[in-house]
Image: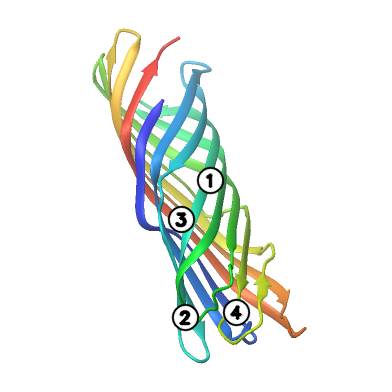
Amino acid sequence: MYVGYLYEDHGAGVNIQFNNGDVVGITSTRNDFTLQGVWLELTAPFALSQNAGLFFALAHLFPVQSNALESYGQAGGAAKREWNPDIQWWELDAALSYRLSQGAFGLAGFRWSSFVVDFGQATNQQGFSTSPDQAQLSVNAYIPYLGLELQANPNCNSSFKAAFLGFPALPSDVEFQETLTPSGQVSTRFSGTTTYKSGYFVEGLAEASAKMASCSLGAFVRFDAIHSDRTRDFTAPDGSSRSADIQFDRRNWIFGGKIGFVF
């Protein structure tokens, strides 16, 4: 079991550039928000043979209240507002490991990451009416990855581990919806699932632990980052065809401890 604190200022964000004209006077938007909370991860490693192993993990973020700032490009000047994001984040992981040499293992795995953010209670609005606009971000990432794990055991009771994972693509479903009611404009809603262009996933992990009978205690630090570029074709309120380039980024650090038992 891994328990840690996850934090990154401006740890996630959505950047949208409207092409072929504006949408109710808006040409672009950028929404950045802080990620923070308690990260809980349950793992189960199994030895398949002397050189091969199997690994399963289930993780969830218990978020604490954060803030989001969204800025807008407009033909008549900039606009902005703040949100109170409600974050729901689950991950499910499965991987195979194989010993390449003494202390080095190759990794191949798959991770499903469900990341849903509801933006509500807009405050400090500039350039918008007082109507109760809302927004939602939903990302289901289906991440295959390859990696390398290095292990060192100075003695029979202590161990050190470092792992590096990544993949040069990010298969995922990304959907962003937002109600837009700029001052002096009618309300409209931008939504729709995007089509994939490019993306990536990277992760780094460092861990130290010590054995005590059938129990092990340790500490870890981990960095994760994903990036996705997408395109959305849609119909503007005036009936004309539009497209939007959408970028989604998420990155974070986790610092914490671990406890393990051998069965």
Q: Amino acid at mark 1?
A: Gln
Seen in the picture, residue 12 relative to 235 is either above or below; the reply is above
| Residue at the (58%, 67%) spot, across then down | 132
| Of pointers 2 and 1, the one earlier in the residue sequence | 2
Real-space CA distance between mark 1 and mark 4, rounded to the nearest whole angstrom: 28 Å
Q: Nearer the viewer, residue 115 or 64?
A: 64
| Of pointers 3 and 4, the one earlier in the residue sequence | 4
Q: Amino acid at mark 3?
A: Arg
Residue ID for mark 4: 18
Q: Secondary structure at mark 1?
A: strand
Real-space CA distance between mark 2 and mark 4, rounded to the nearest whole angstrom: 15 Å
Residue ID for mark 1: 88
| Of pointers 2 and 4, the one earlier in the residue sequence | 4
Q: Amino acid at mark 4?
A: Phe
Q: Secondary structure at mark 3?
A: strand
Residue 207 visible within the image: no
Residue 79 marker: 2
Real-space CA distance between mark 3 and mark 1, rounded to the nearest whole angstrom: 14 Å
